[in-house]
Every structure is written in C-alpha cells, then in structure tokens.
Image: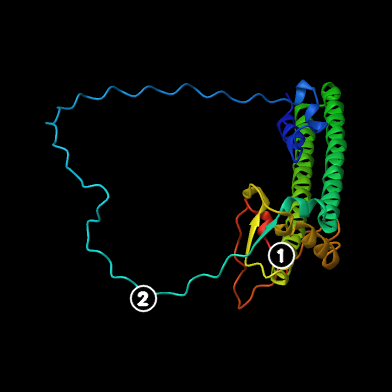
Amino acid sequence: MMTARPALAALAALLIPAGAALAQSSDPGFFIPPQQGGGAQSRPAQAQQPQRPPQQPQRQQQGRPTGPNPAPLPPGQPPPAAVIGIVDVPEIQRNSTAFNSVRDEIEKRRQKLNEDLQREQTRWREEQQNLANQRATMNPDQLRQKERELQERITDSQRVFRDRSRAIEQVAQGALGEIEQAMAVVIRQVAASRNVNLVLPRPLVIFNDAPFDLTDEITAQINRVLRNVNMPPEGQAPAQPAAQGGQAPAQRPAQAPAQQQRR
C-alpha cells in the first residue's frame, strides 16, 4: 500500500462540516478504520481490610450559626426603583444589516474553501492512481521517491487549507465582536433615552406589555450606526490590536468568540 493514503484521508477530513459533499465520498481506499483498543485490565482483588468499630454519629444542630452573630452594618443607600426594558438579541441579529452581511460573506468563504478542497482531493487521487499504474515500470528506489514527493505535496496542501480556515474563523470572530460592541452601546443609549435602568433578555420573561420591549428601537438604531463591517480580503487574517503599555492583549476564551473586541 502507498504511504500517501493516510495523509490523503486526513486532507479529506480537513475543514469539512457535517453534510458536506466531500464527507459523502464512498471511496473505500481513503477510509482508515479506527484502531480498537484492548479491553481494560481487571484490577487485582484487594485484600480484605479489618473492619473498624462503628463510630457514633455526631449530632449537629441544623439552622443555628456556630459563631457569634455578626454586628449589624450601618444603613446603606437603597437601590433605585427598577425601570425594566426587554431586549431580544437573536431578533436584533436577524434584522441587523451588518450581521447578515457578515454571515453571508463568511458562508461564501467557507463554501469556496470546501470547493477548493474537493478539487485538491480529486487531484491527489488522480496522481496516486497514476503512480500505482507505474509501479511495474519503476524500481523500488524510484517508487519510494515518487511516494515521498506525493506525501510532501499533500502535507503542504494540508497546511495551506488549515491556514485558510483559521483566517476565515478569525475574520468571523473579529466581525462579530465589532457588532456585539456596537450593539452594547446602542442598548445603553436606548435604555438611557427611556430612563431604563434594568434590561432583561426576552427569553427570561414570561409576559410583558409591548411598551417594555426595546427590540425594534434598538434594531433600527443599530442599522443606522452600523450598516456593514469592514472585513479583510479573503485569505488575510485580521490585524491584531496593538498592545498597550508594552503588554500583550489578554487571551479570551475560545468558547465565546463573539466577546472579542476589535479596535
């Protein structure tokens, strides 16, 4: 078997979401079955320990503090009366011009990446088949050299597609972070104009009258202040924000990419 097949199978698995056409390929020559691990070894039987005499349970008084009562604090300033506003963030995103343009552009780049990957896979498959047909005309050294060259080209292709996928995700995170930042500013502006001091997401509210809902007003305002997001050209990652005070910017968790802010 040729040594290029495992790398070609890995190339086919790169960056393809569930349901993509590449994942539906039925060519058994590029399917590598997973290795089944051996069964877990049973633990040796432990020696039977001598039983200790049962201890008497300690009685604990429930609901009573064990220490002295804390001293009361001086009276503080009571919080203001709550003026509540309701916001539906998913609806704002659905009706946001900037959000929809970013989503369409990212999906277009991902689709192009998948199409290029399919063409590249077909190209490697054809070269592998041609090499297999020439086995009888080459000596072992020549065959190994050809297989090594094919393996190196596949490895380089994997790196290129991995870099392109990473650039797309970085662009998406930066654009969504900019939209999120603008949305937070607009929510504060609309809430201040209504004298609202407490904003709740709509999924947490069972019932509310229409005047409490600020969603339409926020959507209209965010479409006025942010109609689109400037994204770098395809294949180029967004510029990293400059470090302040000689310190590198803090890394944000990967689970919440939308929280990244672009400056």
Badge 2: residue crowd in 10 Å (few <14, some 14–19, many ≥20): few
Q: Residue at x 83, y 34 (%)?
A: 121
Question: Please, what is the three-letter code of the amino acid marked with disc 2?
Answer: Pro
| Image mark for residue 187 | 1
Q: Are marks 2 and 1 in contact (CB under 8 Å)?
A: no
**Does residue 148 lie above or below 215 as drawn?**
above
Q: Residue at x 87, y 47 (%)?
A: 108
Residue 120: image quadrant is top right
Q: Say what secondary structure mark 1 lies in.
A: helix
Question: Please, what is the three-letter code of the amino acid marked with disc 1?
Answer: Ile
Q: Nearer the viewer, residue 103 or 195?
A: 195
Give how far across and how far down residue 75 sits, in percent: 39, 74
Q: Residue at x 85, y 36 (%)?
A: 118
**Which residue, given by chain and number where applicable, does mark 2 sit on?**
74
Give how far across and how far down residue 80 sits, in percent: 55, 70
**Direction from residue 200 to residue 62 in the image, left or right:** left
Q: How many numbered circles are shown?
A: 2
**Does residue 116 lie above or below 132 as drawn?**
below
**Does residue 105 lie above or below 241 as drawn?**
above
Q: Nearer the viewer, residue 113 or 132?
A: 113
**Does residue 43 lie above or below 247 as drawn?**
above
Q: Quadrant of the C terminus?
A: bottom right
